[in-house]
């Protein structure tokens, strides 16, 4: 079904069909890799929520879901990697096979923090599934075991990703018109939500 383009969106980077196809592939891969394991998917709110609910239905295994919410501290225009936990997990992680589900890996600082935080809780294993991975220079390479798509270094919205709390419900991933956020620098003003 054709999707009407939101007036604030410059172009569609990933269509709903591409997202669905790749999510099926990731689900099949995760199903094969975690057979016989004690899988706990940890969604990082709010951005990863839409991807997680689609991904989880493509994993043909017994599993549990938990969520955590974090917010960035510090520098206003760039991720500082110093994050505050707004909502912690309900489940203990010791002995669990934990798969963190992230919306997008930009600098990777947030992911680094989450990994350190969760590693300290002694899971049996800890891996990361990121829907989007931005191609950009980084001080150190950031690893995610499962990646949906490598994308250019543009500010994207839709399929769970927001700008100022909006656009999460777009069924595609699109590049926001710079005029929408009023400037050349695309980084969100207040860090992650
Ligand atoms: P990092 O610590 O990897 O720089 O930041 C990752 C977080 O920044 C993501 O989880 C997301 O909340 C936000 N972010 C980074 N790039 C984008 C983007 O292009 N669009 C949106 N909507 N959020 C982004």
Image: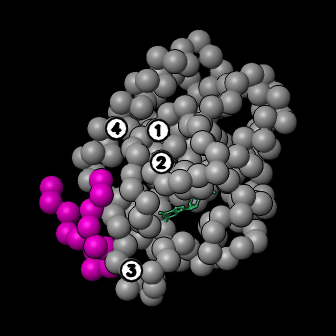
Q: Name the residue under label 1.
A: 147
Placement of the N terminus among the 4 image quadrants = bottom left
Q: Assess whether mark 1 and mark 2 are in contact (beta carbons under 8 angstroms).
A: yes
Residue picked out by circle 2:
133
Image location of residue 90, percent across then percent down: 76, 44
- Of the two numbered discs 2 and 4 in the rendering, the one whose residue sits closer to the viewer: 2
In the image, which residues are magenta? 1-14
Q: Mark 4 points at which residue?
A: 22
* Relative depth, front residue between 174 and 184: 184
Label 1, residues with CA under 10 Å away: few <14, some 14-19, many ≥20: some
Label 2 vs label 3: CA separation?
A: 21 Å
Mark 3: secondary structure: helix
Looking at the image, which residue is at 47% across and 21% down?
A: 31
2 or 1: tag closer to the N-terminus: 2
Give the residue furthest to the left.
2
Q: Which of marks 4 and 3 is in front?
A: 3
Q: Which mark is residue 178?
A: 3
* Percent coordinates x, y for residue 22 in the rendering: 34, 38
């Amino acid at each position: 079904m054709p999707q009407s383009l939101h007036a604030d969106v410059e172009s569609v980077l990933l269509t709903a069909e591409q997202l669905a196809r790749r999510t099926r592939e990731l689900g099949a891969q995760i199903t094969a890799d975690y057979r016989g394991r004690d899988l706990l998917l940890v969604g990082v709110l709010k951005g990863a929520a839409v991807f997680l609910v689609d991904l989880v239905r493509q994993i043909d295994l017994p599993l549990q879901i938990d969520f955590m919410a974090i917010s960035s501290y510090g520098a206003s225009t760039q991720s500082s990697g110093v994050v505050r936990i707004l909502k912690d997990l309900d489940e203990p992680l010791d002995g669990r096979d934990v798969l963190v589900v992230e919306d997008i890996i930009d600098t990777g600082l947030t992911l680094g923090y989450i990994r350190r935080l969760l590693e300290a809780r002694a899971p049996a294993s800890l891996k990361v599934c990121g829907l989007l991975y931005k191609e950009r220079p980084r001080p150190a390479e950031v690893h995610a075991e499962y990646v949906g798509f490598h994308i250019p270094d543009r500010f994207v919205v839709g399929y769970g990703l927001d700008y100022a709390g909006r656009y999460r419900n777009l069924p595609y991933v699109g590049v926001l018109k710079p005029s929408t956020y009023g400037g050349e620098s695309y980084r969100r003003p207040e860090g992650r939500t």
